[in-house]
């Protein structure tokens, strides 16, 4: 991994003027080349559990983000022309408020867009859901929530200027994750409602024009105590060949005495040829996987009641999964499947940072690079690489991309099919800002993908 050291001191100067963009407004803030490509991100504009935000396709990197009123916006970067276009409003979120709140707690943020470019070059976004309002109908796989899971597509291939809604997925979704297979099949994974809901996928074999009905894969049901539902937080990514990998954590969702605890770490993989699921050792699973089945067959860590959150799963050239997960809020831990077993988890981050999100590049079975954005206790944040060159046994803090004593940062997951010059997006959160509009940056091996006009 060639990661440049781009350590910059933030001036904290803010653009004086923020405006309400209309559908085809261009980003006109600032003059001359700048590191960010838009300052119209809103709230927490890029997801990590809503993923991916961006994809490189035919010479262009397309990126979607949550903009004003929580609507879905898109920008595009033409690598040959070295030119950004957008932002363009691609779709409306029912969860947006007018005027835009200035308190982030009033922004839902669950409906941040996931993006995919289909085999014909059309760009799709799925966004806007936090379980779906009850008025949208009966939720067969869980409980309703807020918003409406919405699918929009560009009217023309490789053109972000105009969009239309495709009413062909369930409205009851949140945490949208899109997996595109080598044959062009598109799998849309999401939680089918609020906490007390199954995780499902819908498959499209025709470039997103139609989707097959929901298939539940993680089961939410009431336990024998008549108070607790089995709930999950999951992250699905493309695996080797024609497979999909899923990591997840468990949430005991209690009616009385509800807590936000998520615990344990689980892994399973899907064979897309026949839709069957198995654990890492190849034992077939019964889906939707129940809590009992998961504990027996797919659990790779019993956290003993300590908070865990899913990070991400990637794989090496030998097809073995490598897993990154958050443990006890302040740490990222790593494990991998090797020689028929999950290796003893290793702590990646040694510094005292929290609120971390990240991704992982498995360069080879021995060389792994982890990208983490973290908050420094009592202050700002940083975006740094953490590297292992001995198959994940030990980790060192590598180069830092951004760091500040006051401003915090959040990275997206890696762009799908990323171009080395545009690998992932990140946004900044400046506590001194009087509003929730965020600058969003794209980073690659050459540093920030600058915007000139
Ligand atoms: Zn709950």
Image: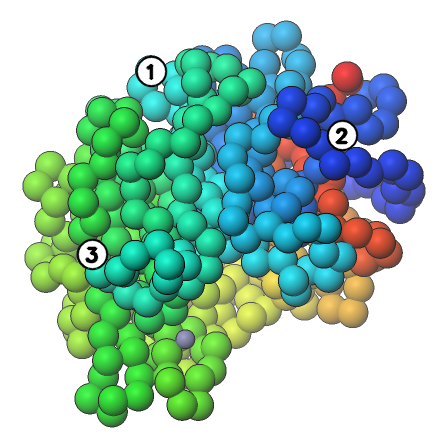
Secondary structure of residue under mark 2: loop
User: What percent of the width, then of the height, locates residue 179?
Assistant: 32, 38
Secondary structure of residue under mark 3: strand
Describe residue 29's horizontal placement relative to residue 174 as left or right. Answer: right
Whether the residues at callouts 1 and 2 have beta carbons within 8 Å, the answer is: no
Q: Judge the density around disc 1: few (<14), some (14-19), many (≥20) Cα neighbours within 10 Å.
A: few
Which of the two marks, 2 or 3, is nearer to us in this view?
A: 3
Give the residue at mark 1.
120
Residue 240 can be seen in this image = no
Give the residue at mark 3.
216
Q: Quadrant of residue 440?
A: top right
* Residue at x 35%, y 32% (from the top left corner): 166
Observer-nearest residue: 278 or 229? 229
Which of the two marks, 1 or 2, is nearer to us in this view?
A: 1
Q: Judge the density around disc 2: few (<14), some (14-19), many (≥20) Cα neighbours within 10 Å.
A: some
User: What percent of the width, then of the height, locates residue 124?
Assistant: 41, 29
Q: Earlier in the sequence, mark 1 or mark 3?
A: 1
Describe residue 39's horizontal placement relative to residue 52 as left or right. Answer: right
User: What percent of the width, then of the height, locates residue 339?
Assistant: 22, 54
What count of labels does the image hold?
A: 3
* Residue at x 65%, y 22% (from the top left corner): 24
Q: Judge the density around disc 3: few (<14), some (14-19), many (≥20) Cα neighbours within 10 Å.
A: many
Compared to 279, does 46 lie above or below?
above
Q: Residue furthest top?
A: 81
How far apart, in angstroms, are the residues tagged by discs 1 and 3?
A: 28 Å
* Residue 35, numbered label: 2
Secondary structure of residue under mark 1: loop
User: What percent of the width, then of the height, locates residue 104?
Assistant: 69, 60
Q: Tell whether circle 3 marks a residue whose Cβ is less than 8 angstroms from ligand 1.
A: no
């Amino acid at each position: 991994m060639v990661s440049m050291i781009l350590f910059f001191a933030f001036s904290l100067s803010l653009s004086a003027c923020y405006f309400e963009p209309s559908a085809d407004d261009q980003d006109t803030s600032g003059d001359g080349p700048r590191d960010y490509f838009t300052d119209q991100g809103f709230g927490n504009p890029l997801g990590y559990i809503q993923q991916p935000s961006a994809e490189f396709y035919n010479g262009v990197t397309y990126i979607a983000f949550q903009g004003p009123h929580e609507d879905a916006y898109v920008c595009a970067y033409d690598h040959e022309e070295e030119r950004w276009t957008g932002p363009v409003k691609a779709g409306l979120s029912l969860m947006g408020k007018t005027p835009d709140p200035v308190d982030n707690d009033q922004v839902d943020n669950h409906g941040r867009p996931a993006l995919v470019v289909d085999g014909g070059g059309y760009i799709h976004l799925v966004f806007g859901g936090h379980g779906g309002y009850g008025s949208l109908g009966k939720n067969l796989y869980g409980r309703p929530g807020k918003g409406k899971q919405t699918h929009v597509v560009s009217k023309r291939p490789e053109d972000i200027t105009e969009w239309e809604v495709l009413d062909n997925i369930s409205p009851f979704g949140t945490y949208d994750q899109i997996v595109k297979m080598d044959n062009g099949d598109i799998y849309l994974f999401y939680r089918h409602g609020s906490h007390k809901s199954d995780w499902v996928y819908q498959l499209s074999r025709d470039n997103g024009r139609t989707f097959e009905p929901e298939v539940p894969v993680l089961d939410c049901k009431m336990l024998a105590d008549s108070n607790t539902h089995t709930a999950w937080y999951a992250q699905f990514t493309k695996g080797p060949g024609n497979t999909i990998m899923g990591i997840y954590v468990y949430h005991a969702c209690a009616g009385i005495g509800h807590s936000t605890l998520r615990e344990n770490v689980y892994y399973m993989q899907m064979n897309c040829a026949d839709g069957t699921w198995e654990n890492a050792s190849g034992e077939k699973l019964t889906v939707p996987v129940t809590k009992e089945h998961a504990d027996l067959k797919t659990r790779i860590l019993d956290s003993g009641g300590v908070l865990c959150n899913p990070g991400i799963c990637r794989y090496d050239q030998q097809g073995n999964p490598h897993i990154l997960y958050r443990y006890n809020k302040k740490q990222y831990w790593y494990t991998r499947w090797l020689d028929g077993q999950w290796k003893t988890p290793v702590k990646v981050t040694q510094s005292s940072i929290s609120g971390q999100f990240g991704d992982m590049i498995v360069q080879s079975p021995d060389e792994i690079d982890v990208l983490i954005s973290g908050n420094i206790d009592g202050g700002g944040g940083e975006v740094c690489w953490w590297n292992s060159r001995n198959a994940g046994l030990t980790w060192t803090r590598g180069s830092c991309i951004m760091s500040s004593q006051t401003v915090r940062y959040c990275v997206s997951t890696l762009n799908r099919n990323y171009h080395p010059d545009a690998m992932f997006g990140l946004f900044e959160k400046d506590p001194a800002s009087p509003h929730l509009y965020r600058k969003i940056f794209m980073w690659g091996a050459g540093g920030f993908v600058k915007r000139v006009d």
